[in-house]
Image (tube, helix red, strand yellow):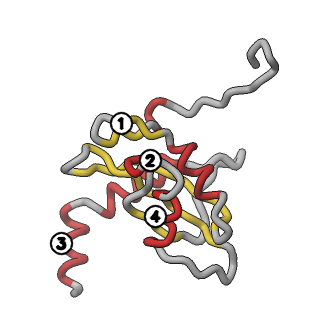
Amino acid sequence: MDSDGTFTLWTGAKDMINVSGFKVWPSEVEELFMKHPAVIEAAVIGIPDPDSGEAVKTFAVLKEDAQVTEQELIAFCRNRIAVYKAPCFVEFVDSLPRNPAGKILKRELRAREQKATEPSALASASEGR
């Protein structure tokens, strides 16, 4: 708590996303996602991108019976924050992984994303087409 009674919450430096040299704090994008009427909760991570170093990806849990597309949520963000901070990808999930205290486990989301983008996973996905 600082001298005027304000609390500041810090996320870990490893959570910060670097998009073409611009810093993106996941909490800023998550707060914006939570303002969308179809979203219950969201978690934001950085994923490897060959052009910008990292890209912003959001995992979103929607309200029951909510109808919204990935592109609609991306447009919602781009109209409210800098374009480089808006997610390039949105994945809809039923729930987010949590620890016993209820904290979202972003390391599990990163591991899941890394596994999904491994060359062997990509090859098997393309064989199924």
Mark 2 burial class by Cα count in 10 Å: few <14, some 14-19, many 20+ = few
Q: Position of residue 64 (x, y in %)?
A: 69, 79
Q: Nearer the viewer, residue 54 or 111?
A: 54
Circles 2 and 1: CB atoms closer than 8 Å? yes
Task: Please give the residue where the numbered disc 2 appears in the rendered image.
Answer: 82
Under circle 4, the secondary element is helix
Select label 2 or label 4 by which is in front. 2
Per the model, the C-alpha gap separating discs 4 and 1 is 18 Å
Task: Please give the residue where the numbered disc 4 appears in the rendered image.
Answer: 74
| Mark 4 / mark 1, whichever is N-terminal | 1
* Residue 22 badge: 1
Select label 4 or label 3 by which is in front. 4
**Residue 119 sits in which quadrant?**
bottom left
Q: Position of residue 101 (x, y in %)?
A: 72, 45
* Residue 123 badge: 3
Select label 2 or label 1 by which is in front. 2
Q: Who's the residue at 25% across and 77% down the image?
A: 125
Under circle 3, the secondary element is helix
| Mark 3 / mark 1, whichever is N-terminal | 1
| Mark 4 / mark 3, whichever is N-terminal | 4
Q: Position of residue 109 (x, y in %)?
A: 46, 54
Q: Amino acid at mark 4?
A: Ile
- In the rendered image, the quadrant that contains the N terminus is top right
Per the model, the C-alpha gap separating discs 2 and 1 is 10 Å
Circles 3 and 2: CB atoms closer than 8 Å? no
Q: Position of residue 75 (x, y in %)?
A: 46, 65
